Image (cartoon, coloured by chain):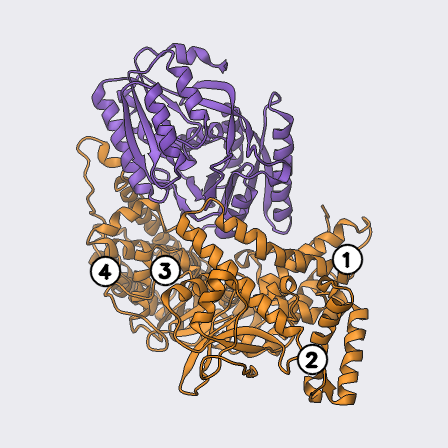
Chain colours: A purple, B orange
């Protein structure tokens, strides 16, 4: 396993481990790695309304991790998900465990941001809040080129609990997208939100990522650009999908160019590392509203292949 | 990608200047006249049918410029209240849905939202206010502002200072502070918050009300010196972005008798407006509570007017882009095809017969195109060589939705522009490009769209998607079979039900309407005793099924059982007769 930021992990002594059971095998690979220095306890979130593969994932995590507590979430009920996450963090506080490691890879963007917010609200109870991200070797591995898909459609767009922003009536709307491979979802978000200004972020892969990744990004970003070509007030920008600090800087730069009399909505659709970056930005800029575009369907049978690389980092 | 300005690009009406609106908007009677009437209205239409553009056109800046009148002479004062996705529907607020005060709190939020937008607009008109008549202004401020807010629970309302600074700016500032307080409450009521020790959700903010605060405020605006003595129109746009609780509140406003002084005009997408009940559980309906205007009906009831509307829209856009070109020249048809069809038409007229059956001269053009399509299939076995091109055909294919036409045109322009020289301009869209784009869009709807809707979706949704696809394919194939037959009436584009549809069939049909595969209308039933359901197929699907989209078409009466069959097995539809089986046709008039 190729590990970056391993000193963050080695610095944990008595920690709680949080992860989301998934149809992706990444979550199991990461759990296997951390179980070498096992956590005191593990909280596993499982979406009850996702798919059958979640049950299999839960079972495997229960075998790998000690003292597993299960917390049910619902993709279609963000309130219940928020309550479940809240109960989990409350238990952590009550347990006396002060170090937390979150595998951010397989949460949805919405779940992850809610979890970050709750941990942040209770940060005084914790001495260390850390994250681990498992890189994928390939996405939509049963398809090639433009046939690759991760999710389809956009069932609804909703504000994420904890990030209502300051959306003032009568002000124009600037929409910032951190787009990824899901051009259809991005197009759906743009169509439904009808922003006055649009910033379409094209995520850049790190140099060591496979060439397919670069090709896919180029292809999908081209599709989005073509869609936006027939609209006015569009600006594309690039951000480093796997570099949290770089993405923070890029977002901060864009925000600095948007005046205060414009409402700002940001929709994350790229890597969870970029979502972590978004969380950091939201902490210092409460005017931005974060929204989640829930897809109609995920490619549960062939979403990703574990890449054998982990990145550990601090949450803030 | 071309750097030429695409004359058909998507423009947000909100962002258009007064001059742009005047250049681009095409008035359509009677819808526009109905919307201007001093009563509550509900404007329904699919996305892209021109609802927001119509609202934009109603605003004071455009009305003043168009009619060459002053602010004081305006016949009505309209304020546009757009409801953006997730703007009012904050997820935290759904916590309130289970508590008894949800309606009151949501009404406060909605009133606050509307009031802030109104105040922002009034700030622009403040320059017309005659401050020399201070007593009248002070009276308005005292009674409709200060007293109104106090009666809604505002504890301390800052005094308005009449020193030359704009009164509406001061009001706007206070309204924003109320809004900030409310957002604070939203954060506190979040399910994340109870985890904090000692926290509890309490509501101790004011409760602004439509009837007790907003209506008196808006009513008294006309008494301000310098303001027009006219009715007030609140243009609530994209109301389908409200939550169900908020929609109940808005419907309650519609059921309030505040017209003609204060009129609420609601625009929403067909099939997406959350409910037609109000907070008291009563059903709000047209014409009792509001005037309903269905923009899509224009297409089916008066195509020439719809076509002329598109013509004018396109010509204005081309002129704006520096092109003075007629639409027929810009979107030419396939001349070879049209010559062939003309020849068939002439043959039919000269013999008075078509395929051995008597045919009137008036019907000859309709029959000729069907014969041509059939002959293509017979000679070349390739239906796809029929060309969907030409302005008239493109208008029909847009199926009543202006944006369909403009989106398709934008794509066509882009394709042509990509191959144009840097110095060149796009003087027309070749028929081959028109045909290719139209076919691509039809295929996208028929295959890609269904695939997207169903892959990985929950079981019940997959089922509905598959059923809709079966039904659409069955209907389309049935219509094609009829088109290439030698029956007397071969051009069909709608199904009509002979009996009441069952819940399962209705679910599929409504799903189809919601996703734009069918339209919905009513017609007289076969027995002449009333109305029945009519579902025209979206004409943009014509290329997939090899149908002729031009002109009026007949409808096929079918039974609920036949539809059920089609939904389950994609079987071709059988025609229903008064006895329930057999062959009989009627012409759509």
**Mark sitting earlier along the chain (3/1):** 3
Whether residue B68 is visible here, answered yes or no, is: no
Secondary structure found at label 4: helix
SS of the residue under disc 1: loop
Whichever of callouts 2 and 3 sits on the residue coming sooner in the sequence is 3
Q: Are marks 1 and 2 on the same chain?
A: yes
* Chain designation of label 3: B
Are callouts 3 and 1 both on one chain? yes
Q: Work out how far the residue at label 1 is from the one at label 2, CA to CA, in angstroms.
A: 35 Å
Q: Chain of mark 4?
A: B
Q: Which mark is residue A78?
A: none
Give the residue number, with chain letter if any, for mark 1: B426
Instruction: Give how far apart the Cα atoms at labels 3 and 1 are.
Output: 43 Å
Q: Is residue B98 visible?
A: yes
Dot 3 corresponds to which residue?
A: B274
Q: Residue at x 53, y 65 (%)?
A: B571
Secondary element type, mark 3? loop
Q: Earlier in the sequence, mark 4 or mark 2?
A: 4
Confirm or deny contact between disc 4 and disc 1 (CB under 8 A).
no
Report x, y in % for residue B142: 26, 61
Q: Which chain is disc 1 placed on?
A: B
Q: Is residue B90 left or right of residue B44?
A: left
Task: Check whether the beta carbons of the residues at disc 3 and disc 1 lie within 8 A of each other.
Answer: no
Question: Do marks 4 and 3 share a chain?
Answer: yes
Disc 4/disc 3 C-alpha distance (Å): 34 Å
Q: Quadrant of residue A223?
A: top right
């Amino acid at each position: 396993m190729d590990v970056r930021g391993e000193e963050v992990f080695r610095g944990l002594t008595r920690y709680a481990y949080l992860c989301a059971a998934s149809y992706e095998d990444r979550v199991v690979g990461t759990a296997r790695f951390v179980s070498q220095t096992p956590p005191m306890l593990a909280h596993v979130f499982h979406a009850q309304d996702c798919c059958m593969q979640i049950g299999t994932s839960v079972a495997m995590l229960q075998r790998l991790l000690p003292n597993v507590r299960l917390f049910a979430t619902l993709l279609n009920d963000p309130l219940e998900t928020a309550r479940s996450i809240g109960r989990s963090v409350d238990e952590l506080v009550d347990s006396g465990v002060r170090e937390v490691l979150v595998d951010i890879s397989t949460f949805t963007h919405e779940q992850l941001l809610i979890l970050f917010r709750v941990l942040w609200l209770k940060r005084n109870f914790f001495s260390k809040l850390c994250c681990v991200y498992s890189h994928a070797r390939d996405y939509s591995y049963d398809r090639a080129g433009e046939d690759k898909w991760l999710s389809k459609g956009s069932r609804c767009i909703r504000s994420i609990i904890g990030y209502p922003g300051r959306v003032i009536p009568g002000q124009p709307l600037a929409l910032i997208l951190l787009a990824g491979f899901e051009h259809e979802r991005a197009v759906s978000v743009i169509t439904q939100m009808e922003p006055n200004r649009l910033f379409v972020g094209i995520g850049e892969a790190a140099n060591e990522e496979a060439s397919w990744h670069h090709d896919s990004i180029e292809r999908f970003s081209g599709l989005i650009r073509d869609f936006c070509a027939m609209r006015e007030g569009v600006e594309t920008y690039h951000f480093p999908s796997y570099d949290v600090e770089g993405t923070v800087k890029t977002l901060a730069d864009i925000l600095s160019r948007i005046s205060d009399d414009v409402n700002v909505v940001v929709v994350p659709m790229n890597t969870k590392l970029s979502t972590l970056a978004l969380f950091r930005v939201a902490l210092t800029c409460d005017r931005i509203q974060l929204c989640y575009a829930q897809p109609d369907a995920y490619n549960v049978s062939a979403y990703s292949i574990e890449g054998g690389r982990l990145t550990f980092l601090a949450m803030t | 990608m071309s750097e030429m300005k695409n004359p058909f690009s998507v423009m947000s009406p909100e962002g258009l200047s007064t001059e742009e609106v005047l250049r681009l908007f095409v008035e359509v009677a009677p819808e526009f006249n109905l919307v201007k009437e001093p009563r509550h209205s509900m404007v329904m239409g699919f996305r892209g049918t021109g609802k927001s553009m119509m609202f934009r056109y109603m605003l004071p800046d455009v009305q003043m410029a168009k009619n060459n009148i002053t602010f004081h002479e305006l016949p009505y004062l309209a304020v546009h209240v757009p409801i953006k996705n997730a703007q009012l529907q904050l997820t935290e607020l759904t916590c309130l849905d289970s508590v008894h005060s949800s309606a009151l709190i949501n009404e406060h939020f909605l009133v606050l939202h509307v009031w802030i937008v109104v105040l922002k607009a009034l700030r622009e008109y403040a320059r017309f206010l005659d401050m020399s008549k201070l007593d009248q202004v002070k009276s308005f401020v005292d009674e409709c502002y200060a007293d109104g807010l106090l009666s809604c629970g505002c504890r301390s309302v800052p005094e308005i200072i009449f020193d030359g600074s704009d009164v509406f700016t001061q009001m706007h500032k206070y309204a924003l502070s109320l809004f900030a307080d409310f957002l604070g409450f939203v954060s506190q009521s979040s399910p994340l918050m109870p985890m904090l020790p000692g926290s509890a959700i309490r509501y101790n903010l004011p409760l602004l009300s439509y009837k007790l605060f907003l209506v008196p405020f808006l009513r008294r605006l006309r008494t301000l010196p310098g303001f027009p003595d006219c009715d007030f129109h609140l243009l609530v746009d994209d109301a389908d972005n409200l939550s169900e609780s908020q929609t109940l509140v808005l419907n309650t406003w519609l059921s309030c008798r505040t017209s003609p002084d204060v009129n609420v005009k609601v625009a929403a997408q067909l099939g997406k407006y959350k409910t037609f009940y109000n907070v008291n559980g009563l059903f709000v309906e047209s014409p009792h509570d509001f005037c309903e205007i269905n923009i899509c009906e224009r297409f089916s009831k008066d195509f020439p007017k719809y076509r002329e509307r598109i013509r004018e829209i396109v010509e204005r856009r081309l002129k704006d882009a520096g092109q003075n070109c007629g639409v027929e020249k810009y979107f030419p048809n396939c001349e070879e095809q049209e010559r062939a069809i003309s020849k068939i038409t002439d043959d039919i007229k000269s013999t008075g017969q078509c395929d051995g059956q008597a045919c009137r001269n008036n019907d000859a053009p309709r029959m000729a195109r069907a014969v041509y399509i059939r002959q293509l299939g017979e000679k070349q076995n390739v239906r796809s060589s029929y060309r969907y091109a030409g302005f008239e055909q493109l208008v029909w294919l847009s199926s009543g939705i202006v944006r369909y036409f403009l989106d398709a045109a934008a794509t066509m322009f882009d394709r042509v522009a990509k191959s144009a020289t840097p110095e060149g301009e796009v003087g027309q869209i070749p028929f081959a490009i028109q045909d290719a784009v139209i076919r691509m869009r039809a295929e996208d709807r028929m295959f890609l769209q269904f695939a997207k809707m169903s892959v990985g979706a929950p079981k019940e949704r997959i089922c509905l998607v598959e059923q809709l696809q079966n039904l659409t394919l069955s209907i389309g194939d049935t219509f094609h079979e009829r088109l290439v037959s030698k029956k007397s009436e071969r051009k069909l584009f709608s199904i009509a039900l002979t009996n009441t549809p069952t819940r399962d069939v209705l679910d599929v049909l409504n799903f189809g309407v919601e996703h734009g595969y069918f339209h919905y209308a009513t017609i007289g039933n076969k027995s002449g005793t009333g109305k029945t359901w009519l579902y025209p197929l979206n004409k943009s699907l014509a290329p997939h099924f090899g149908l002729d989209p031009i002109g009026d078409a007949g409808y096929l009466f079918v039974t609920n059982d036949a539809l059920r069959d089609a939904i389950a097995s994609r079987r071709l539809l059988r025609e229903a007769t008064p006895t329930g089986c057999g062959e009989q046709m009627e012409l759509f008039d």
